[in-house]
């Protein structure tokens, strides 16, 4: 038996030993996300770093040994936290498959707005209002009842533009849209409205887009942290503040007076 096979058996034994009934270890619910070779490389590299750190001694040696211990634990457990964070969620996989994209990044959030559902729906249904609460959306030009043109502020003082079509419109319930196939940044999204008796309207927002550079771009979004989700939350918070403060009525009246 080769050294690699022995090392593989060693890791497998540790893993199964922790899962056997009656063993001192507790069964782990953490899923394996490393293949055999990845575990072998992590284990062998981690073990070597631990030995090197112990031989060196001192603060530098301790840091090397700690790094080696982390790699060794990664190999033994078969689980990498960073890889799990970067992996596409089931939702992202389904969206990418359904839309025919190389990859998908998704964000969603929910908020309660203390305004009647018909009022909230009507405001959101007029896509010209979206830039008032959606970050980076510069303007929306209405083409007809279902088609619109979106202009987005991009980094380095650039803009992105594409045409969007409404794919679903159920008054006071749901609005869904997606960009056309030629869009520079393909995306889809929906807003769903539910009446909350005595309180107002619950609004659920969901946005999905195909990251530039496909899977690599999706991982960059993941590494970005919670920023996309924070943007989704901020979008609904701005919508909530805008409607509850009655600013949409003030703007509408100003528009009428201006005409």
Image (cartoon, rainbow, N blue to C red):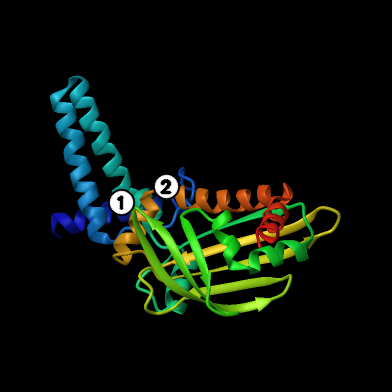
Q: Where is residue 28 shown, x and y percent of the image? A: 47, 51
Judged left or right of residue 25, residue 123 is: right
Q: Residue at x 49, y 62 (%)?
A: 139
Q: Where is residue 150 shown, x and y percent of the image? A: 47, 67
Q: Where is residue 48 shown, x and y percent of the image? A: 16, 40
Q: Quadrant of the N terminus?
A: bottom left
Judged left or right of residue 41, residue 254 is: right
Few, some or many residues within 10 Å of mark 2 (<14, 14–19, 20+):
few
Q: Quadrant of the C terminus?
A: bottom right
Q: Judge by depth and name the residue closer to the eye, 221 or 8.
A: 221
**Disc number at residue 126?**
none
Q: Which residue is mark 2?
A: 225
Judged left or right of residue 2, residue 131 is: right
Q: Earlier in the sequence, mark 1 or mark 2?
A: 1
Q: Judge by depth and name the residue closer to the eye, 59 or 98.
A: 98
Q: Residue at x 36, y 60 (%)?
A: 159
Q: Judge by depth and name the residue closer to the eye, 37 or 5.
A: 37
Q: Judge by depth and name the residue closer to the eye, 236 or 57.
A: 236
**Would residue 142 be seen by someone viewing this image from the given angle?**
yes
| Mark 1 to mark 2 CA distance (whole Å) | 21 Å
Q: Which residue is mark 1?
A: 156
Q: Residue at x 71, y 71 (%)?
A: 173
Tag 1's secondary structure?
loop
Q: Where is residue 12 shown, x and y percent of the image? A: 32, 56
Say if 155 sits above or below 165 in the image.
above
């Amino acid at each position: 038996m080769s050294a690699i096979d022995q090392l593989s058996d060693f890791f497998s034994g540790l893993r199964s030993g922790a899962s056997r009934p009656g063993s001192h270890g507790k069964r782990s619910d953490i899923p394996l996300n490393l293949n055999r070779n990845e575990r072998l490389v992590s284990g062998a590299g981690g073990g070597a770093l631990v030995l090197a750190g112990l031989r060196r001694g001192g603060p530098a040696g301790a840091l090397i040994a700690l790094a080696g211990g982390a790699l060794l634990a990664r190999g033994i457990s078969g689980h990498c936290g960073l890889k799990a964070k970067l992996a596409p969620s089931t939702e992202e996989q389904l969206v990418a498959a359904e839309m025919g994209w190389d990859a998908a990044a998704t964000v969603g959030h929910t908020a309660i707005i203390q305004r009647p559902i018909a009022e909230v729906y009507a405001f959101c249904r007029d896509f010209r209002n979206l830039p008032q609460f959606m970050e980076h959306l510069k303007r929306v030009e209405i083409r007809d009842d279902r088609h619109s043109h979106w202009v987005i502020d991009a980094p380095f003082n650039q803009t992105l533009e594409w045409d969007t079509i409404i794919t679903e419109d159920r008054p006071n319930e749901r609005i869904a849209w997606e960009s056309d196939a030629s869009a520079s940044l393909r995306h889809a999204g929906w807003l769903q409205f539910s009446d909350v008796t005595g309180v107002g309207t619950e609004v659920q927002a969901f946005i999905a887009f195909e990251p530039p550079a496909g899977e690599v771009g999706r991982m960059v979004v993941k590494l970005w942290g919670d920023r996309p989700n924070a943007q989704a939350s901020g979008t609904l918070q701005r919508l909530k503040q805008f409607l509850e403060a009655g600013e949409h009525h003030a703007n509408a009246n100003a528009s009428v007076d201006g005409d």
